Image (spheres, helix red, strand yellow):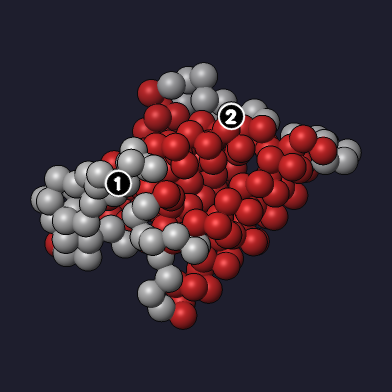
Amino acid sequence: MSGDTHATVGVATALVSCVLNPWMTGSVGVGVVAAVVGALYPDLDLGKSKGNKLMNKVLVYLVPAGLLVGFANRLGFVKMEVGKLAALIVLVLFGLFVRTRPHRELSHSLAALVGTTILVAFGTGGQVWVWYGIGYLSHLLIDLLNKKGESLLWPLPEKFNLNLCSSNGVVNQLMRYVAVVIAVLALACLKAGGQK
């Protein structure tokens, strides 16, 4: 699926999860950013165009750095704890590594989902890891729909897919539009419930 579809589905899934799970407290804005990062992180291994390469660089370098600064301020840290900083550095280094791997291999595995979500948990504290993990999982699930397989059980060589649609076809566009509508409805529910 396209990057904008991954981002919108990740956000919609995270917002619906927030509506359904009142224990997901904190700022919805911070959670949405984490969900977008999680939804886009698996495609760091995709480098077809200059624009996509630029997007990958932004994701690998600036987004984790921005999250680091934002969460440090948000969580009231006077200085960043060494363990948290180390976890975020490892997350960036892993992102650099997956850029060297074939598309839909390591970064599209359950191991990468779990590993990067743990790094986000250690690196940010709070519930940011939940939002990130939801975004990442949404990416893996919607990529299962298309014709190209994913190495979900990496390092095993098997690839999984449902072969139901093309990654840039009508289903991709429809999914993006439906996700936008769901996200808006979920935000309305959160606002009505008094969520920040």
Residue 125 visible to an observer of this rendering: yes
Q: Which residue lies furthest to the front in this view?
A: 156
Would you place residue 69 above or below residue 172 in this image?
A: above
Residue 77 in the figure: left or right of residue 108: right
Q: Residue at x 37, y 42 (%)?
A: 154
Q: Which residue lies furthest to the right in this view?
A: 78
User: Where does label 1 land, which residue?
Assistant: 157
Point out residue 105 in the picture as x, y percentages from the top left corner: 37, 52
Instruction: State which tag comes first along the sequence, 1 or 2.
Output: 2
Residue 15 in the figure: left or right of residue 142: right
Question: Tag 2's secondary structure?
Answer: loop
Point out residue 6 in the picture as x, y percentages from the top left corner: 36, 53
Q: Residue at x 48, y 34 (%)?
A: 114
Point out residue 196 in the picture as x, y percentages from the top left corner: 57, 35
Q: Quadrant of the N terminus?
A: bottom left
Residue 133 in the figure: left or right of residue 63: left
Would you place residue 103 above or below residue 27 in this image?
A: below
Mark 1 vs 2: CB contact within 8 A: no
Binning the other alpha carbons within 10 Å of mark 1 as few (below 14), some (14 to 19) or many (20 upward) gives few
The residue nearer to you, when weighing 10 against 112, is 112
User: Where does label 2 land, which residue?
Assistant: 127
Query: Which label was assigned to residue 110?
Result: none
Kind of residue sitting beneath label 2: Gln
Marker count (numbered): 2
Point out residue 184 in the picture as x, y percentages from the top left corner: 36, 45
The residue nearer to you, when weighing 169 against 109, is 109
Q: How far apart are marks 1 and 2 (CA)?
A: 33 Å
Residue 191 visible to an observer of this rendering: no
